[in-house]
């Protein structure tokens, strides 16, 4: 179990057109005097969104075009193919857009993917990139970071098989920085609200010093200050993002939750540049949108 002592975080947020920033590119490794790469300077790009494959959506096409110009691993935070996650909807609504990046995509399932029993088309479409078929949770390393993709639709109690797997996975991880992503958010200011069935999963992630959680489900962008699983602001807590902005019709904010720092109903993708002991985030909007949000933080 890692320490939960957090270094100071610097945050830069812009919610209007008064400031703009082009997507950052990953820093290039530098060499030490012995000619070996310096791990401190190595970085990896992790970019994506959720609530994506809505047939005929200009938003879906526009966010896929953003990915065309951004390198790195692509993530999804569920509800990949609307409205029912059928094989035909994956082919017709997801594949022509975000499907261009399928080989570099590591997805998470959402409730609409499970409208088809067992989310079978989801697992068939993404194959090994979705982890063990039928489970919906898996982990991998990206640069210096440990990444965990979870299933918020089934098996989320503290006694579930997924919870037991997560405890073991995090205990085996010797890295300093961890990011987890799934569909249903524990905290949200959107109309679908905060979903308490994910609290025990949060407790596990919090206990192991996880830095970041990314969710979808509410079709908007939101960023929270670091907090604990009970919603108390905590400098040693988890910073949560919601990026349900992949293409499904956008939602408006319903009731602003404590610790919510930034909110916007804007199509776009959330991009992380993951360094050895720190991270940068940037919400990259579709062309013509005024909203921007970016900042940086230190790992525990």
Image (spheres, rainbow, N blue to C red):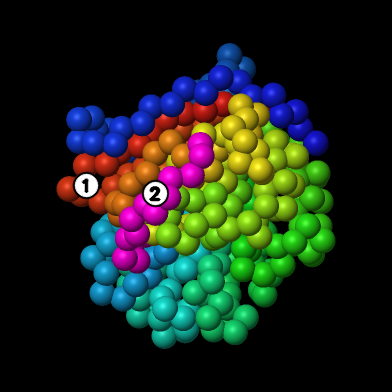
Question: Quadrant of the image for the N terminus?
Answer: top right
- Tell me if residue 138 comes above or below residue 202 in the rendering: below
Where residue 41 is drawn, which disc sits there? none
Q: Is residue 209 magenta?
A: no
Residue at the (42%, 30%) spot, across then down:
295
User: Magenta segment range?
Assistant: 245-259
**Mark 1, residue position:** 289
Secondary element at image label 1: loop
SS assignment at label 2: strand
- Give the residue displayed 80% in from the left and 45% down from the top: 172
Where is residue 227 drawn, in percent x and y?
60, 36
Disc nearest the viewer among 1 and 2: 2
Instruction: Quickly name the residue at label 2.
Output: 221
Residue at the outermost top position:
33
Q: Is residue 66 visible?
A: no
Mark 1 is surrounded, within 10 Å at the Cα level, by few (under 14), some (14 to 19) or many (20 or more) other residues, namely: few
Q: CA distance from mark 1 to mark 2?
A: 13 Å
Where residue 95 appears, as percent x and y from the top left, is: 38, 73
In terms of depth relative to the viewer, which is nearer, 101 or 6?
6
Closer to the camera, 201 or 259? 259
Q: Residue furthest front?
A: 255
Q: Is residue 53 above or below residue 274?
A: below
Which residue, as the protein is rendered here, is positioned at the far left? 288
Query: Label 2: few (<14), some or many (≥20) within 10 Å?
Result: many
Figure check: 45 above or below 4 = below
Quadrant of the rendered image containing residue 49: bottom left
């Amino acid at each position: 179990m890692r320490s939960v002592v957090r270094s100071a975080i610097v945050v830069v947020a812009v919610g209007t057109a008064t400031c703009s920033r082009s997507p950052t590119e990953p820093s290039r490794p530098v060499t030490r005097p012995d000619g070996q790469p310096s791990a401190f300077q190595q970085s990896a790009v992790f970019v994506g969104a959720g609530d994506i494959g809505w047939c005929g959506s200009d938003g879906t096409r526009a966010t896929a075009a953003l990915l065309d110009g951004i390198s790195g691993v692509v993530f999804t935070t569920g509800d990949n193919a609307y409205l029912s996650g059928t094989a035909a909807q994956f082919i017709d609504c997801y594949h022509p857009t975000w499907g261009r990046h399928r080989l570099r995509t590591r997805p998470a399932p959402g409730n609409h993917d499970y409208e088809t029993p067992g989310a079978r088309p989801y697992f068939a479409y993404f194959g090994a990139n979705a982890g063990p078929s039928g489970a919906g949770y898996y982990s991998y390393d990206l640069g210096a970071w440990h990444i965990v993709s979870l299933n918020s639709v089934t098996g989320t109690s503290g006694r579930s098989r997924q919870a037991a797997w997560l405890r073991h996975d995090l205990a085996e991880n010797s890295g300093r920085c961890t990011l987890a992503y799934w569909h249903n958010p524990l905290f949200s200011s959107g109309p679908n609200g905060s979903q308490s069935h994910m609290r025990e999963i949060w407790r596990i992630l919090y206990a192991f010093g996880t830095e970041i959680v990314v969710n979808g489900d509410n079709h908007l962008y939101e960023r929270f200050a670091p907090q604990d699983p009970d919603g108390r602001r905590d400098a040693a807590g988890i910073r949560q993002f919601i990026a349900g902005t992949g293409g499904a019709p956008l939602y408006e904010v319903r009731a602003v939750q404590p610790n919510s720092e930034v909110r916007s109903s804007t199509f776009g993708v959330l991009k992380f540049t993951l360094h050895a002991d720190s991270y940068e985030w940037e919400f990259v909007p579709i062309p013509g949108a005024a909203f921007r949000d970016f900042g940086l933080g230190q790992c525990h």
